[in-house]
Amino acid sequence: MGRGGLKRALAALALAAMAACGASNAPSAEPEETPAIAPSAFAVMRCPGLNAGMPCLVVMAGGKTLVFGAPEGVTGALEQLERPIPDAVFVATLNPDGLEGLARLRNRSWVLGRTLPLSLVGPDGIDTFAAHLDEAHARSDAVVYLNKRPAGNFDAALLAPTAVPPAGQARVFDTGDLTVDALAALSGQLTYLVRYDGRALQISPCNGPVTPMQGVPLDISLDCDALSDPAGWPFPARTHLIVQ
């Protein structure tokens, strides 16, 4: 099978699995208090309002909102944080548990005022997945745009994917003071290194690369443990504030 055929197969499998996903990934019904985060903070927290086992973390730094994982309920979590329009979304694998909420996040953030395509970073195949998702929503995007035009233009509804190939490493987000680097295992799973204000945070999925990238000293490393889903991400039970 060629590279293009493999990507199409991965996208089809992920979409099919998303449709078949059961109620075990439903958002938690219990309200959850979230701390006030100062604009100057470097903070990482589990997405509020979601079950602890769901692959979803929010990093806030330099006035930016970065989402790691896009499970069902991620849109509501960001609205609870009063940051409904993320600056970028990062996924570690093509596991459907971390992609189920992407379509709603894509559409809702556009309707609420996102004016550029939503940056999406993931392993090899995420670009094909994003293209299929955009294609599937093209007709409904047109209806939304004609009936109740969002602040952004029509193309702003789209996803802007960046795929990191297996065993590759790349800088995938950079505002000057806030950067994100991705490192892919041979399996394609990604580890992310987030740096801001002289501090470093590493987020590693199970079965992914966990060695600190580029020899950078880490202030916080969130990686796989016995309580994590072996196919997923670390899910901290409490909020981690690095700099406040």
Image (cartoon, rainbow, N blue to C red):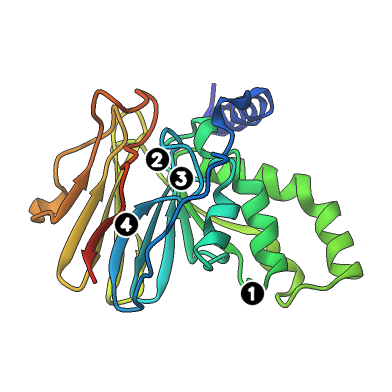
Position of residue 31 in the picture relative to residue 220 (left or right)? right
Residue under numbered circle 2: 92
Cβ–Cβ below 8 Å for labels 2 and 3? yes
Task: Please tell me which of labels 4 and 3 falls first in the chain.
Answer: 4
Ranked by sequence position, the earlier of labels 1 and 3 is: 3
Label 2's element? Answer: loop
Label whose residue precedes the other's in the sequence (2 or 3): 3
Residue underneath mark 4: 44
> Which of labels 1 and 3 is toward the front?
3
> Against 48, is 3 above or below?
above
Whole-percent x and y of residue 232? 39, 31
Residue that carries the numbered disc 3 in the rendered image: 69
Q: Which of the two discs, 1 and 2, labels the residue nearer the N terminus? A: 2
| Label 1 packing within 10 angstroms: few (<14), some (14-19), many (20+) | some
Q: Secondary structure at mark 4?
A: strand
Instruction: Give whichever of 15, 59 is nearer the camera.
Output: 59
Give the Cα separation between the discs numbered 1 and 2: 25 Å
Residue visible at 55% across and 31% down in the picture: 25
SS under mark 3: loop
Identify the residue under disc 1.
115
Label 4 to label 2, Cα distance in Å?
Answer: 16 Å
Tag 3: residue type?
Gly
Query: In the image, is 151 to the left or to the right of 232?
Result: right
Position of the C terminus by quadrant = bottom left
Residues at marks 4 and 1 touching, judged by CB atoms closer than 8 Å: no
